[in-house]
Image (cartoon, rainbow, N blue to C red):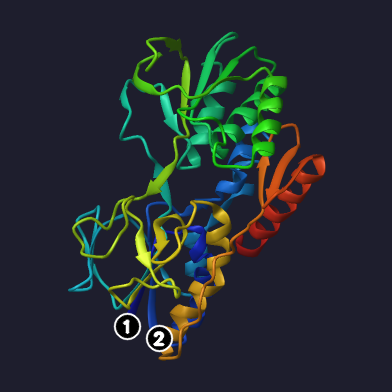
């Protein structure tokens, strides 16, 4: 019996895990190796922080998904891949052989360029960290007039700030929320999106510091490149993401940020028995943004191509959409949406996002 191993329970592998029995029917022994039995849906993370959702509404039981199809769940972490000998090395020091693997280990916050001392700063990923942040605020660790600083002015930083604002209103605490960005906030997005986001942040009393580079973080103080500093009782890192590092020293082709380079079949450009999806891949001829919409759309392609590979059938192509819909959760059940040059805001946009997110959750929740 050949071994099909899924590394990580990321969003792009959910369709495959849900259909474990299909792979089993082809004579494959199916295993999922993941450090956690649950995978949280990043699209609902800010709403979880803001009090809109409970944890169980925002996560998939990937252990149950694979076991319901008579596969095996291994609670461990892959730290190295040997594609020549087709072997995986685990954090527990165990070694696992494979014939075919699929990788979606997600991403982590990029913070290597920051000098950080102390434990006041928490990255927004993994999403479980947002539960810790919320608990810390509600439990009383943060008093009135405390300062919360989000480092990062991208979509994640904006959503975290606005939903923190919603949380502080709910629990009636006077907390100062600030965003520090080394560029203009949402710099790569349409100017209208930036303008609306800034207006919303200003209306909520969230202070925004643009084009300010953080040089170092020492306990409860942030030092900026202009010589100033900011007091911080709780810090949140939303400085962009990079793949979880399991490819180094493997010989598997990867790009500058550590993403596995794949072809249009979501297959390694060097090893035909290695597939992948989500934030930990990049396409050979098409640089992909690290957004969930790609992982969601990769789901059925990855599932079918793994089946076709085993059957010896032609693989199907994945074509990333050039323009995709993005909706930010701006707190207070309002959304900010754009696709191409179309920008819309308000409660209807939030309800559209909520509908799309919950539909995705229902598909893979047991």
Secondary structure at badge 2 equals helix
Is residue 230 left or right of 293 when viewed as pictured? left
In front: 214, or 76?
Answer: 214
Task: Identify whether 313 is placed above or below 352.
Answer: below
Q: Which residue is mark 1?
A: 2
The C terminus - image quarter? bottom right
Residue 35: horizontal and vertical position, in percent?
37, 52
Residue 357: horizontal and vertical position, in percent?
67, 53
- Pointer 1 local density, CA inside 10 Å: few below 14, some 14–19, many at least 20: some
- Pointer 2 local density, CA inside 10 Å: few below 14, some 14–19, many at least 20: some
Is residue 295 left or right of 244 when viewed as pictured? right
Q: Residue at x 35, y 64 (%)?
A: 261
Q: Residue at x 45, y 59 (%)?
A: 9
Q: Which mark is residue 310?
A: 2
Residue 281: horizontal and vertical position, in percent?
40, 60
**Mark 2 or 1, nearer chain start:** 1
Q: Which mark is residue 256?
A: none
- Residues under labels 2 and 1: Cα distance? 10 Å
Residue 197: horizontal and vertical position, in percent?
67, 32
Task: Identify whether 167 is placed above or below 13.
Answer: above
Dot 2 and dot 1 residues touching (CB under 8 Å)? yes
């Amino acid at each position: 019996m050949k071994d099909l191993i899924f590394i990580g329970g990321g969003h792009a592998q959910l369709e495959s895990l849900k259909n474990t029995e299909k792979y089993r029917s082809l004579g494959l022994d199916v295993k999922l190796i993941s450090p956690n039995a649950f995978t949280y849906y990043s699209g609902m993370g800010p709403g979880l922080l803001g009090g809109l959702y409970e944890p169980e509404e925002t996560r998939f039981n990937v252990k149950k998904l694979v076991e319901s199809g008579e596969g095996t769940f291994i609670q461990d972490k892959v730290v190295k891949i040997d594609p020549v000998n087709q072997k995986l090395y685990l954090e527990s020091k165990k070694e696992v052989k494979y014939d075919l693997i699929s990788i979606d280990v997600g991403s982590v916050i990029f913070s290597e360029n920051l000098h950080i001392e102390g434990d006041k700063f928490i990255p927004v990923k993994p999403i479980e960290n947002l539960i810790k942040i919320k608990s810390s605020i509600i439990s009383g660790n943060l008093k009135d007039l405390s300062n919360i600083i989000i480092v990062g002015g991208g979509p994640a930083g904006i959503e975290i700030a606005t939903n923190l604002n919603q949380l502080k209103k709910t629990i009636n605490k006077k907390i100062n929320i600030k965003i520090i960005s080394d560029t203009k906030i949402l710099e790569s997005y349409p100017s209208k999106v930036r303008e609306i986001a800034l207006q919303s942040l200003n209306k909520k009393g969230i202070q925004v510091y643009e084009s300010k580079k953080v040089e170092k973080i020492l306990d409860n103080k942030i030092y900026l490149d202009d010589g100033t500093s900011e007091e911080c009782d709780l810090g949140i890192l939303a400085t962009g993401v990079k793949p979880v590092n399991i490819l180094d020293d493997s010989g598997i082709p990867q790009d500058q940020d550590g993403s596995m380079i794949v072809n249009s079949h979501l297959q390694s450009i060097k090893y035909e028995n290695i597939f992948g999806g989500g934030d930990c891949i990049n396409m050979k001829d098409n640089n992909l943004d690290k957004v969930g919409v790609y992982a969601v759309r990769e789901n059925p392609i990855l599932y079918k191509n793994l089946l076709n590979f085993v059957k010896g059938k032609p693989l199907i192509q994945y074509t990333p959409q050039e323009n995709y819909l993005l909706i930010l959760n701006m707190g207070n059940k309002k959304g900010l949406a754009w696709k191409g040059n179309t920008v819309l805001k308000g409660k209807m946009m939030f309800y559209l996002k909520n509908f799309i997110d919950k539909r995705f959750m229902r598909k893979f929740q047991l």
